[in-house]
Image: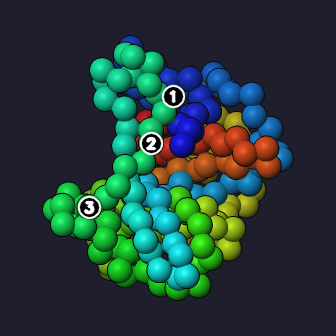
Amino acid sequence: MKKILTIYDRNWEGNRKVNEKLIVDFKFEEAIATEKLDGMNIRLTIRSGTVVRVEKRRNPSKIQKHQGIINPWYVDAVESDSRDKWIFDAVKNTDLTKVKDGEWSAEVIGKNIQGNPLNLEKNEVFLFSLPDWKAKITLENVPATFDDLRAYLVAQKSKIGNDAPIEGIVWHHPDGSMVKIKRKDFDL
């Protein structure tokens, strides 16, 4: 898994918010914009409609970052581990019987995840790596200029949340590259 780049430069010495300097070479007009979901990143392995493996994202530690390890990876989630209990609750609450065999990146969202910013009633899995699921969070007419994008993020509501703002936007280019911006990257 590769870390998704933020599109604007960040004030690393101060408040860590973004400034107007675009730091990615990205063709926004060729990309699909989707809602960035505020949850916990996981990967599911599915065989014959059954989840056979659940993995959670692991970010490099400060020591690992100093060693040059910058991209996150997946490790197995353990059902008997209390730290993973809400992941497995979300998996149980989500109908995955029609998902074809494969490894699918997803987001765990819901009442016990990240303070429930989407105001959901239960924990669930959202398979953003599946095209028909991704279509549910696709955004139209998303601007890419600093001021317009900031205004857009203030006004935009989540497509799957209950009267909740979106966390941010992820652009997906046909070549596989992705970039992002979050509301909290601005002073919002």
Classify mark 3: helix, strand or loop: loop
* Mark with earlier residue (3, 2): 2
Q: The residue tagged with tag 2: helix, strand or loop? A: strand
| Residue occupying the point 37% across, 16% down | 66
The amino acid sitting under disc 1 is Val
Residue under circle 3? Answer: 78
Lower sequence index among marks 1 and 2: 1
In the rendered image, the quadrant that contains the C terminus is: top left
The type of residue carrying mark 2 is: Trp
Looking at the rendered structure, the kind of residue marked 3 is: Val
Coordinates of residue 158 in the picture (x, y in percent): 52, 65
The answer to whether residue 2 is seen in the rendering is: yes
Question: Which residue is at the far right?
Answer: 30
Question: Which residue corresponds to mark 2?
Answer: 73
- Residue in the picture at 67% in, 61% down: 139
Quarter of the figure that contains the N terminus: top right
Task: Give yes or no for contact between labels 3 and 1 (Cβ–Cβ under 8 Å).
Answer: no
Closer to the eye: label 3 or 1: 3
Residue 165 visible in image:
no
- Per the rendering, the mark at residue 18 is 1
Task: Answer few, some or many: residues within 10 Å of disc 3's Cα (few below 14, many 20 plus, some between 14 and 19).
Answer: some
Discs 1/2, front: 2
